Image: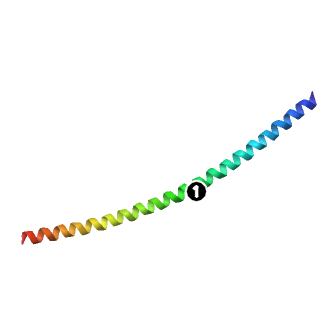
Amino acid sequence: MLEATLAQLEGLVAELLQQNQTLTANCQQLEQQLQQAREENDALQMAALEQEEQQGATLARLQALVQRAGASNAA
């Protein structure tokens, strides 16, 4: 009986070790995906900020054109 219990325990330990390896590999893969997502997020945020700046500059130019057009119509 002790031999059977010991063999069963060895089998369970081996199974747990295999599950641990699988979970460790999954965790590493998720960490890599998270890092990629963070890098992509940073790039997208930077692009959004640059686009906001460009839109602001374009708006200022358009407002200046409208003011000039309005001034020449008033004259």
- Relative to 31, say whether 71 is above or below: below
Identify the image quadrant of the N terminus.
top right
Amino acid carrying mark 1 in the image? Gln
Q: Position of residue 50 (x, y in %)?
A: 39, 65
- Quadrant that contains the C terminus: bottom left
Q: Residue at x 14, y 69 (%)?
A: 69
Residue 38 location, x and y as percent?
Answer: 53, 56
Q: Residue at coordinates 84% horizontally, 37% vertically from top-left?
A: 11
| Picture quadrant where residue 57 is located | bottom left
Q: Is residue 68 left or right of residue 20?
A: left
Q: Residue at image x 44%, y 63%? A: 46
Q: Name the residue beneath numbered marker 1.
A: 35
> What percent of the width, then of the height, locates residue 37?
54, 55
Mark 1 residue crowding within 10 angstroms, few (<14) / some (14–19) / many (20+): few
For residue 4, above or below residue 61: above
> Does 46 sit left or right of 9 as displayed?
left
Horizontal relation, residue 68 to residue 13: left or right? left
Q: Is residue 35 left or right of residue 74?
A: right
Quarter residue 6 falls in = top right
